[in-house]
Image (spheres, helix red, strand yellow):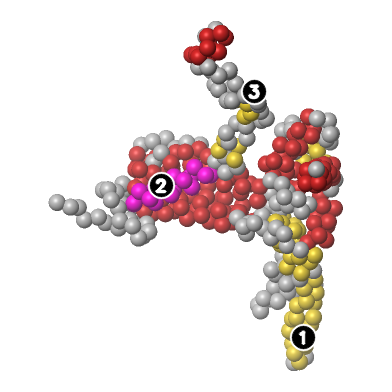
Amino acid sequence: MTRNMQPCTLECGRDVEDTCYVCAECGTRLTTLLTALADTPEPDPAVLTHPSKPHHEHCELCDLPKTERRRIGHPDLNPLRRTGLPQTRPGLLADAEDRIAHGQTVDASEKDEHGHTVPGTEGATHLPYRYTPSEARWDLLITLTSVADTIAKRRGLYRPLNTPQALAGFLTGNIAWMRAQPDGGDLIGELLDAIQRMKRAIDVPPQMQYAGPCTADVEETTTRIVAGTEVTDLTVRPCHGELYARPGATDVTCPGCGTTYALADRRAWLLDQVADMLLPATEMARAVHGLIGIDIKADTLANNIRWWHHAGRLLEAGKARNGANTYRVRDVIDLVINSARTRARAKQAEKTA
C-alpha cells in the first residue's frame, strides 16, 4: 500500500516524502542559510617542512632505526607545518556589519505633494551607517528571537542568548522539529524570508567595485502659483547616487542622474579621501581592494600587510581600540603598487631570458 504524499506547506512545488509538513529540501536550505550567518574557520595554511622531499606524516615505521627504514624504503618524516595566522571566512552577519559601517549619504531636502524639492531646503545628510542593511539585520534578529521563543515555549526548552549566532545554532538543532509541525511551514518561511531580505540588503551587484558617491548637480523644476499665474522655478541640488563599476571598465555612470565619470579620476578622488586614514590590516584590505586597479584579493592583501610589517617594510602608525596595529592607507598603497611593478618586471625578465 502506497502513501499519498502531500505537498510541502512552503509551496515550493515539491512533495513531502516523509510524515512531515515541510519537505527535506526546504529544511536543508534553511540549515545552509543559518550556518552561513556565522564565520567559518578556514583550513590552516601549511607548507612542507622540507619542500624538496615528499610529504609524509609520522607513523609507526618512522620509529624504526634509520638503517632499517632505509632497507625497507620507508620515506623520511616530512610533515606539514602551519604557517601564518588562522584565517576565517566571514559569514553573512560579518558582511552585514561591514556593509552597515560604510555609511550613507541621503537627501535631506523637503518634498512637496508632487515629489519636487522645496526651494531652500536642498541638502544632504551623511549617516554613519547604511539604513537598509541595518534595518534588515534588526528584522532578522527579531525574527530569530520570535521563532526561538515559540520553539522554547512549546518544547519546554531554554532559549539561548539573544544574539544571532546563538539563536542560529539553537534553530538549526530544531529544524527537524519545525518540519514536523502543522505550522512548520510558517516558522521556516519566516526564517527564510528574513535571511534572504538581509542578503539582498547587503549584496553589492556582482563583480562591481565601489567608485565613490556621485558629485554631479541635478536640475529640478518646481511649479507654484503667484498671483494666479503659474511660475516654474529651476533649482539645482547635488546628486546623492552611489557609483559602482565593473572590473576592467574605463568609466562609470551614476544610476541616479546618468552622469558618466572616468574611472581613473574616481579612483584618484577616493584615494585622496582615505590616503591619511589609519586602519588595521583587515579593514585596510577591504578599503584598498579595488581602488587602485590592481587585481589582488582582500584576504591576500591583509596577509601581505602583516608580512610587510614583520619584515620592517611597513611601520605601524597607531593602535586600534582592540590593540591591533593600524597602518596609513597611503603607505600600504605605495607597497602594493611597488610589488605589482616588481612582479611585472620579473615576468618580463623571464620572457626575455
Query: Image point 69% across, 46% down: which residue?
Result: 297
Asked whether the residues under the numbered discs 1 and 2 touch, taking CB atoms below 8 Å apart as contact, a structural biologist would say: no
Frontmost of labels 3 and 1 is: 3
Disc nearer the start of the sequence (3/1): 3
Residue located beneath label 2 in the image: 28
Badge 1 density bin: few <14, some 14–19, many ≥20, Cα 10 Å? few
Residue located beneath label 3 in the image: 49
264 or 30, nearer to the observer: 264
Frontmost of labels 1 and 2 is: 2
Task: Measure how far apart labels 1 and 2 are at the Cα level.
Answer: 59 Å
In the image, the segment drawn in magenta is 22-37
Task: Measure how far apart labels 2 and 3 are at the Cα level.
Answer: 41 Å
Instruction: Say what amino acid the circle numbered 1 marks.
Output: Thr
SS under mark 3: loop
Query: Is 80 positioned to the left or the right of 243 in the image?
Result: left
Numbered tag placed on residue 232 in the rendering: 1
Q: Check if residue 23 falls in the magenta segment.
A: yes
SS under mark 2: helix
Task: Measure how far apart labels 3 and 1 are at the Cα level.
Answer: 78 Å
Query: Image point 76% across, 71% down: which residue?
Result: 259
Magenta span: helix, strand or loop, mainly?
A: helix
Badge 2 density bin: few <14, some 14–19, many ≥20, Cα 10 Å? some
